[in-house]
Structures are given as C-alpha cells and as structure tokens.
Image (tube, helix red, strand yellow):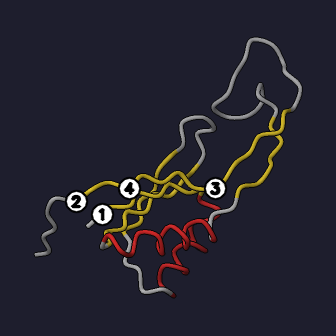
Amino acid sequence: MKLIVAIVQSEDAKRLQNAFIDHDVRATKLASTGGFLREGNTTFLVGVEDEDVDDVLDIIHENSQTREEVITPGLHPGISFEQQIDPVNITVGGATVFILPVDRFLHF
C-alpha cells in the first residue's frame, strides 16, 4: 500500500477532486499554503494499493495544469525586494507529488 500526497494549486483542486470522485478514488483534502508565492494550495492524501498508483498519478497529471503567470516581485504579496523589479513570467500550477510506503493501515 502507498500514500500519495499531491499538492496542487487551489485553482486545480475542484477539478481534481471531481476526477477522484468520478474514478472512485477516496482522498482527504487539506488546505495548504505555498512557500514561494504564499498562495493557496490544496493537499490531497490518497491511500492506494500498489497496483493503483499509476492510475491515480494519471488522474492527478490530467487534472493539474501548469500555466504562465506574470508577477511584479515588489508588488506581489510574499515577495519583496528593496527596489522595484520589472514584471517576470513564472510557471504556476501543476502538482507536486510524494509517494510514501504504508507499513500499516487501520480504519476505526
């Protein structure tokens, strides 16, 4: 058994949650905050059998898209510099996924 921890941008969270429901994947949804932009993320915890890991990863990949965003570092919350810096393009979205072994699973 594995525990999949998937961190997605909040903009993708509802779509991913619906895809989990459509594919009968049980997941726990937690609100979280990213460190770089300090914007909202959603973390999903999914316990799956080893043979189902790739299927769940496919669902995550299909429903968490990367996109370009323009930020002005001196004006963006969470990023500050001494002097004004020109706007820059950054890539946001997608998913950060950790797959951990589960030694034991209990349900009470």
Q: Residue at x 71, y 55 (%)?
A: 66
Compare marks 1 and 3 and give the one earlier in the sequence.
1
The residue at the far front in this view is 51
**Which residue is disc 4 drawn over?**
99
Q: Residues within 10 Å of mark 2 (few under 14, many from 20)?
A: some
Residue type pointed to by label 4: Ile
**Left or right of 105 on screen, residue 35:** right
Q: Residues within 10 Å of mark 4 (few under 14, many from 20)?
A: some
For marks 2 and 1, give the CA distance.
5 Å
Q: Nearer the viewer, mark 1 or mark 3?
A: 1
State which quarter of the image contains the C terminus.
Answer: bottom left
Q: Residues within 10 Å of mark 1 (few under 14, many from 20)?
A: many
Mark drawn on residue 94: 3
Relative to 50, say whether 32 is above or below: above
- Quadrant assignment, res 43: bottom left
Residue type pointed to by label 3: Gly
**Left or right of 61 on screen, residue 27:** left
Q: Percent position (x, y) of residue 54? A: 46, 70
Identify the secondary structure beneath mark 3.
loop
Residue type pointed to by label 2: Val
Q: Percent position (x, y) of residue 40? A: 57, 51
- Quadrant assignment, res 35: top right
Q: Percent position (x, y) of residue 16? A: 56, 72
